[in-house]
């Protein structure tokens, strides 16, 4: 038995809220990258949930999610490579330290 459609946006909103909270409160670069991925996955959950209609499945929504996942994986890989380089250079992953270095 499948869940009703209105549960999926509620779960996606919860996941998105957790991502926004982590992005606003965490100071570690890797934790912020994970928070951004949570937010993107919450949006993808909405696309998948609304792609399934009583008339059938909308392939446009699913193809958009597939494209979003591939681009998101590439962006995450680049962000984590940057985090590794930041750690090698400064020995820390604190965002506040990086902001102070810019001044």
Image (cartoon, rainbow, N blue to C red):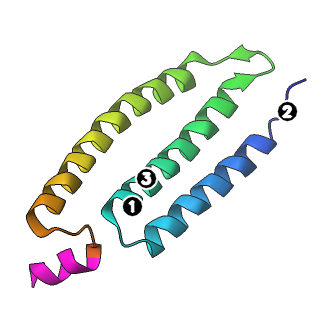
Residue at the image position 81 percent from the left and 42 percent from the top: 6
Q: Which residue, given by chain and number where applicable, does mark 2 sit on?
A: 3
Residue 38 on image: x %, y %: 51, 50
SS type, badge 1 = helix
- The structure residue drawn at horizontal position 68% and vertical position 33%, both measured from the top left corner, is 49
Mark pair 1, 2: CA separation: 31 Å
The secondary element bearing badge 3 is classed as: helix
Which residue is identified by label 3?
Answer: 34
Q: Residue at x 9, y 85 (%)?
A: 103
Secondary structure, mark 2, is: loop
Dot 1 crowding, Cα within 10 Å, few <14, some 14–19, many 20+: many
**For residue 86, above or below residue 64:** below
Mark 3, residues whose alpha carbon is within 10 Å: few (<14), some, or many (≥20)? Answer: some
Q: Nearer the viewer, residue 37 or 26?
A: 26
Contact, CB < 8 Å: mark 3 with mark 1? yes
* Disc nearest the viewer among 2 and 3: 3
Q: Quadrant of residue 28?
A: bottom left
Would you say 15 lies left or right of 5 here? left
The numbered mark, 2 or 3, whose residue comes first in the sequence reads: 2
- Disc 3 to disc 1, how far (Cα)? 5 Å
Does residue 99 show up magenta in the picture? yes
Image quadrant in which the N terminus is located: top right
Q: Position of residue 96 (x, y in %)?
A: 27, 80
Q: Which residue is mark 1?
A: 32
| Main SS category, magenta section | helix
Magenta segment, which residues? 96-103
Q: For the image shown, how many numbered marks are present on the structure?
A: 3
């Amino acid at each position: 038995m499948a869940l009703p459609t209105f549960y999926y946006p509620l779960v996606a909103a919860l996941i998105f809220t957790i991502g926004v909270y982590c992005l606003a409160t965490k100071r570690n670069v890797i934790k912020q990258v994970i928070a951004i991925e949570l937010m993107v996955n919450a949006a993808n959950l909405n696309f998948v949930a609304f792609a399934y209609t009583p008339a059938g499945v909308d392939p446009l929504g699913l193809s958009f999610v597939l494209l979003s996942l591939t681009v998101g994986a590439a962006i995450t890989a680049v962000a984590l490579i940057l985090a590794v380089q930041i750690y090698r250079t400064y020995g820390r992953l604190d965002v506040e330290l990086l902001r102070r270095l810019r001044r």
